[in-house]
Image (tube, helix red, strand yellow):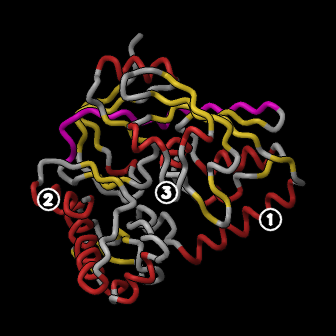
């Protein structure tokens, strides 16, 4: 079975940052069988979802990657929803709403995919993706397909078992509750309006929150206090309405973004002795300076 792939793939326009060079080879599996076949044939391959929280080096990436965007099947059985990892958050939110099911209203403004949202236990507006989860089917580091219950996923703030055990989310199962469709829609519209006023829209290319909130503190407030809203480097700048967002407003490069992140990180560290931890993912290329900046911030 041959799975579709593209060599020397220009990734820039698929990323929400609109930054990135050419990838040696990109695979687009449509189901779990194709996914596992690619992984068996390319054990070192990197896996990505919707590239909504990923900065890719402007110099590109010499390796191969899997994009799960075509793994997007959704099944509804009563109040249960089974969704593949590549389903986009807003699409799942709308499908649930049409079925009169509540629990995904918070996802209407999330540009990411379900797999990535499980990985980092995405949350907003008092709801989180783990709230209504029943089980997750994952691929383990050893190449086995294992179904984990919600309890076995060890969810915490912006964390799950996935990062610790290097699990790849393939499919998810949720149990939602029935509510009047008008009530669900009203909540979704409220969440969208909140997002519009608190986060840059995707017509300003961005990657969402840049740094995680430290314990009992707000990364945005810390960054605001050091004047980060006035920071810019090259074609990248901190968004004027929230200091924890970087926007690519003038053909910014990955180096621009990483240098700007490092300036934000360093100023907070110097003033408060707090080391902010990146919430985004970086796929490095051949640029040693980029890799070095990223390693310092990831420690």
* Residue to which mark 3 is pinned: 158
**Which residue in the rendered view is the most extreme toward the left?**
288
Image mark for residue 186: 1
Compared with residue 49, is residue 207 higher up or lower down, i.e. above or below? below
* Of the two numbered discs 3 and 1 in the rendering, the one whose residue sits closer to the viewer: 3
SS of the residue under disc 1: helix
SS of the residue under disc 3: loop
* Of the two numbered discs 2 and 3 in the rendering, the one whose residue sits closer to the viewer: 3
Structural crowding at the residue carrying mark 3, measured as other residues with C-alpha within 10 Å and reported as few (<14), some (14–19) or many (≥20): some
Magenta-drawn stretch contains 72: yes
Q: Position of residue 218 (x, y in %)?
A: 47, 77
Q: Position of residue 155 (x, y in %)?
A: 55, 49
The magenta stretch is: 60-77
Tell me which residue sits at (80%, 65%) in the image: 186
* Residue to which mark 2 is pinned: 292
Q: Give the image quarter of residue 19.
A: bottom left
Q: Earlier in the sequence, mark 3 or mark 1?
A: 3
Left or right: 180 as drawn, with respect to 229: right
Q: Earlier in the sequence, mark 1 or mark 2?
A: 1
Magenta-drawn stretch contains 193: no
Left or right: 73 as drawn, with respect to 295: right
Structural crowding at the residue carrying mark 2, measured as other residues with C-alpha within 10 Å and reported as few (<14), some (14–19) or many (≥20): few
Tell me which residue sits at (41%, 61%) in the image: 207
Q: Main secondary structure of the magenta part?
A: strand
User: CA separation, marks 3 and 1?
Assistant: 27 Å
**Which residue in the rendered view is the most extreme toward the top?**
1
């Amino acid at each position: 079975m041959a799975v579709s792939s593209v060599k020397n793939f220009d990734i820039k326009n698929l990323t929400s940052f609109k930054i990135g060079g050419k990838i040696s080879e990109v695979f687009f599996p449509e189901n779990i069988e194709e996914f596992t076949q690619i992984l068996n044939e390319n054990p070192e391959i990197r896996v990505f979802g919707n590239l909504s929280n990923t900065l890719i080096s402007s110099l590109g990436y010499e390796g191969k990657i899997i994009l799960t965007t075509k793994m997007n099947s959704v099944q509804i059985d009563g109040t249960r929803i089974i969704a593949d990892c590549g389903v986009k958050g807003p699409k799942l939110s709308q499908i649930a709403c049409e079925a009169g099911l509540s629990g995904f209203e918070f996802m209407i403004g999330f540009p990411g995919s379900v797999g990535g949202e499980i990985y980092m236990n995405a949350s907003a507006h008092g709801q989180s993706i783990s709230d209504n989860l029943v089980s997750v089917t994952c691929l383990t580091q050893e190449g086995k397909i294992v179904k984990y219950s919600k309890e076995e996923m060890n969810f915490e703030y912006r964390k799950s078992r996935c990062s610790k055990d290097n699990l790849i989310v393939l499919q998810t199962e949720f149990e939602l509750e029935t509510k009047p469709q008008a009530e669900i829609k009203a909540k979704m519209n409220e969440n969208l309006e909140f997002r519009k006023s608190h986060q840059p829209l995707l017509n300003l290319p961005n990657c969402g929150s840049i740094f995680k909130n430290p314990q009992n503190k707000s990364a945005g407030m810390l960054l605001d206090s050091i004047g980060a809203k006035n920071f810019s480097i090259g074609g990248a700048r901190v968004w004027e309405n929230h200091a924890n967002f970087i926007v690519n407003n003038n053909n910014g490069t990955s180096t621009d973004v990483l240098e700007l992140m490092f300036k934000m990180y360093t100023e907070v560290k110097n003033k408060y002795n707090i080391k902010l931890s990146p919430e985004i993912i970086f796929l490095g290329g051949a640029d040693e300076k980029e890799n070095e900046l990223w390693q310092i911030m990831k420690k």
